[in-house]
Amino acid sequence: MASLPRTQHEIAVDRMREPRLTVRVWEDCDILVLMPPGAAHSVWWWFEQGRFTGWYVNLEAPCVRRADGVDTDDHVLDIVVTPERRWEWKDVGEFDGRIGEPHYFDDAAAEKIRAEGCRVIGLIEAGVFPFDGTHTGFRPEPGWPVLRLPGMTQAGRESDSRPA
C-alpha cells in the first residue's frame, strides 16, 4: 500500500487534506541566512559540526519584515552550491510540475523565477558576494540564546502547552 503524501513536495498545496504547520527542531547542521531586502531569493550558509559545507539559494518572493519575523512564499526551485562554487539546480521536476497549479505560478511567473536563479548563478560563477567566502568562518557568539518559538520547551521540542 502506498503511503499518503505528507508534504508540499509530494503533493500540491491545494490538494492537501487538512494541511497543518508543525514546529520541528532543526537538526544535523547550522545555517546562517541572508534575506536581502527586495531580492527574490535568500542565501543560506550551511555548517556541519562547525565546518562550512556550502550555500543553498532558496528562490522565493521578496521577504516582508515584521516585528516578530519575516513572511515570504517559496518558489520551489532552488540552487545548491559547494564551497568550490560548483552549483546545481534543485527540485526542477517539482517546479516544472507546479506551473499552472493553483497557489503556485503561471508560465510568466515561472520564467521570472528561473531568470532570478540564472542571475544568482552569475554571482556564484563570478565569486562575488555572497559567494566570495564571506561568512564561511561564521560562528555565533557563545552567549547568544538558542532560538525558541512559542510553545517550545528548553530542549527545543514542542511543548504540550497551548497559548491561551
Image (cartoon, rainbow, N blue to C red):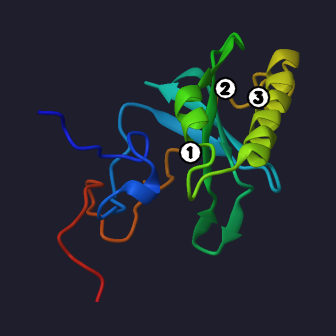
| Residue at mark 2 to residue at mark 3: CA–CA distance | 6 Å
Give the image location of residue 76, x and y in percent. Answer: 58, 41
Residue annotated with mark 1: 141
Q: Residue at x 11, y 33 (%)?
A: 1
Residue annotated with mark 2: 136
- Answer left or right for 102 relative to 2: right
Classify mark 1: residues with Cα within 10 Å, few (<14), some (14-19) or many (20+): few
Mark 1: amino acid: Glu
Residue annotated with mark 3: 134
Give the image location of residue 130, x and y in percent. Answer: 79, 32
Give the image location of residue 108, x and y in percent. Answer: 79, 46
Mark 2: amino acid: Thr
Q: Tag 2, which secondary structure?
A: loop
| Residue at mark 1 to residue at mark 3: CA–CA distance | 17 Å
Are dots 2 and 3 in contact, CB under 8 Å? yes
Give the image location of residue 90, x and y in percent. Answer: 58, 26
Mark 3: amino acid: Thr
- Answer left or right for 83 relative to 160: right
Q: Tag 1, which secondary structure?
A: loop
Q: Is residue 54 above or below residue 65?
A: above
